Image (cartoon, helix red, strand yellow):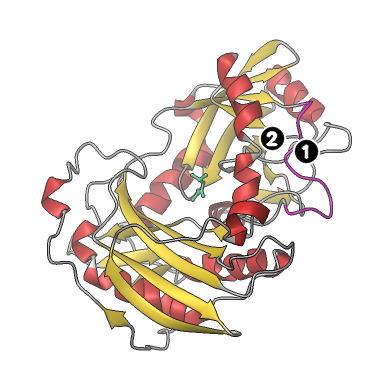
Amino acid sequence: MSATEQISFRVEPTKTSRLSQVDFNNLKFGQNMSDHMLVAEYNNGKWEDVSIVPYGDLSISPSMSALHYGQAIFEGIKAYKFEDGTVSIFRPDKNWERFNKSASRLQMPEVPEEIFLGGLKQLLDIDRGWVPSIEGTSLYIRPFMFATESALGVHPSISYKFVIITCPVGAYYSKPISLKVETHYTRAAEGGVGFSKNAGNYALSLYPTQLANDEGYDQIMWTDALEHKYIEEAGTANLIFRIGDTIITPHGDTILHGVTRRTIMQLAEEWGYKAEQRKVSVQELIEGIKSGKVSEAFAAGTAATITHIDRIGFQGTDYNLPPIEGRDFSNKVLNYLNQLRYGKIVDPFGWNFII
Ligand code: COI
């Protein structure tokens, strides 16, 4: 990957690092924020005041428009540490591109490469010690932007804050998950904001997910808004199936265009599998499980990485998927990506962004 343009930011290093307080053998997702964060302000049509400062509270106005009208977007990225101490971020350029697509759909300003990628590089350089090295762990990176104008009129904000925070994490899901096919509630409709990574897409999932949790499922398998017939995504991750010899992922503008999903579909093609992005009906999936044609099903995302699905609930019946050990494709991808991300094999695709 080409080097990003360097711009100078105001850097205020912390006087008291919290690094020694972290138990790297027992990392909980999103609980141990690293020492520094990047903050940039957008005012009068331009980005200004980019700074890397000690992690801490932000001051906001109660009439700040993001709190009322939801102009708020985010990303999820991971950085890894090689055995020799090298720090590498996995495909952050793709997250930067997706972030700006979300921004434009929510009528927010784009964040330039120098701030998103260049800033991330400087932030990780200063917090290099926070990138864990134990296999299965990584530094989770959360860039986000929200509208800061103090105004209750409904209009695009004239000011924004772009922030990057990071935290060392272990697995988001520590075991295979069960999904309930959702046929009543809807995540996204055609023409809506399903493809974007905006905060509201996650808020709306909380109530139906709680209902699914109450029924004993870990997550929801969302279906299309019109007929509840076609599978979309899991809300915290995309979905990928192996049906016969084909690797298939649902596709469309109601689904988040995941970087992990895209990576896996590219690998499937490279390795000679038939790979398809197309509609998958619930019926095709259920019939496929019953007949044995569906041999693999997994959630794919930055936080989730690859999480096997072991059970799918549909209209009151549970369908169990084949044992994890026999899932050649997903196990091979998981192993390959682990080796690549931790620098144990050469990176033929230029996916590792070395700090
Ligand atoms: C990610 O995979 O990075 C996400 O943003 C999912 C999040 C809801 C945990």
Q: Main secondary structure of the magenta part?
A: loop
Side (left or right) of 242 relative to 281: left
Give me the C-alpha separation between circle 2 and circle 1: 10 Å
Q: Residues within 10 Å of mark 2 (few under 14, many from 20)?
A: some
Give the camera-side residue of 268 and 132.
Answer: 132
- Furthest toward the top, the residue is 316
Q: Amino acid at mark 2?
A: Ile
Determine which of the numbered discs, if any, sits on residue 280 in the image: 1
| Quarter that holds the N terminus | bottom left
**SS class, disc 2:** strand
Mark 2 Cβ and ligand 1 under 8 Å apart = no
Q: Nearer the viewer, mark 2 or mark 1?
A: 1
Image vertical order of residue 34 relative to residue 294, above or below: below
Residue 264 makes an appearance in the image: yes
Instruction: State the residue at coordinates (73%, 63%).
Output: 153
| Quarter that holds the C terminus | bottom left
Residue 116 makes an appearance in the image: no
Mark 1 Cβ and ligand 1 under 8 Å apart = no
Q: Amino acid at mark 1?
A: Val
Residue 243 lies in the magenta stretch: no
Instruction: State the residue at coordinates (49%, 36%).
Output: 307
* Residue 322 locus on image (x, y percent): 56, 22
Which numbered disc flags the more N-terminal residue, 2 or 1?
2
Residue beneath disc 2: 243
Instruction: State the residue at coordinates (22%, 65%).
Output: 128
Residue 240 lies in quadrant: top right
Determine which of the numbered discs, if any, sits on residue 177 in the image: none
* Residue 85 locus on image (x, y percent): 18, 64
Q: Where are the magenta residues, as a range? A: 183-193
Asked whether disc 2 touches disc 1, contact meaning CB atoms under 8 Å apart, the reply is yes
* Residue 216 locus on image (x, y percent): 55, 15
